[in-house]
Amino acid sequence: MAKNRKHQSAAIRFGPALKAFLLCLLIGGSGVGYVWQKNQIYDLGQQIRKREIRLKVLQDQNDGLRRQLAFMKSPAFLQERVKELNLGLVQPQASQVWYLQEPAPESNHAGRQLALRQMSPIAMNE
């Protein structure tokens, strides 16, 4: 006797529909994931661009401050500030300046001789 479709189990009737639903869910989820990932890449690119601009601004500011520091260290600027602040500072006289000679560097021969003196007599005989 042939079985009637009405008496088939629910798993057999809903199996293809469930497979189609899962396939649609997989494709839809992949699409949403792809769009989310592209959005994240775009946002990270924007952050990188903003930080590069900020870095350029800070580098320019740093260069300006370096130039300002070099100018403020110049003798002409310092002399002007001394006059402006009435500090009463003047250039030293020649007799007030002491010139020191730099000590001569030690020769390497003294170091080698010291090393030879520290060797044990047994090592020197071999």
Image (cartoon, rainbow, N blue to C red):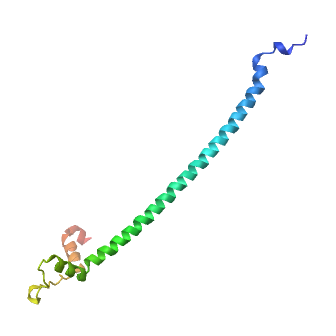
The quadrant in which the C terminus is found is bottom left
Residue 88 percent coordinates (x, y): 11, 80
Q: 18 or 75: nearer the eye?
A: 75
- Which residue is painted at 19% across and 74% down in the image? 114
Q: 19 or 99: nearer the eye?
A: 19
**Vertical placement of residue 18 versus 10, above or below:** below
The quarter of the picture where residue 81 lies is: bottom left
Taking the image as shown, residue 126 lies to the left or right of residue 60, namely: left
**Vertical placement of residue 25 versus 34, above or below:** above
Residue 50 percent coordinates (x, y): 49, 58
- Which residue is painted at 13% across and 83% down in the image? 90
The quadrant in which the N terminus is found is top right
Residue at the limit of the structure toward the bottom, as seen here? 94
The quarter of the picture where residue 45 lies is: bottom right
Residue at the limit of the structure toward the right, as seen here? 1
Residue 22 percent coordinates (x, y): 70, 31
Q: 118 or 77: nearer the eye?
A: 77
- Which residue is painted at 81% across and 15% down in the image? 8
Residue at the limit of the structure toward the left, as seen here? 95
Taking the image as shown, residue 95 lies to the left or right of residue 105, namely: left
- How many numbered marks appear? 0
Residue 109 percent coordinates (x, y): 23, 80
Q: 113 or 61: nearer the eye?
A: 61
**Vertical placement of residue 126 versus 104, above or below:** above
Is residue 106 in view? no
**Vertical placement of residue 79 versus 4, above or below:** below
- Which residue is painted at 68% across and 36% down in the image? 26
Is residue 76 in view? yes
The quarter of the picture where residue 69 lies is: bottom left
Residue at the limit of the structure toward the top, as seen here? 1
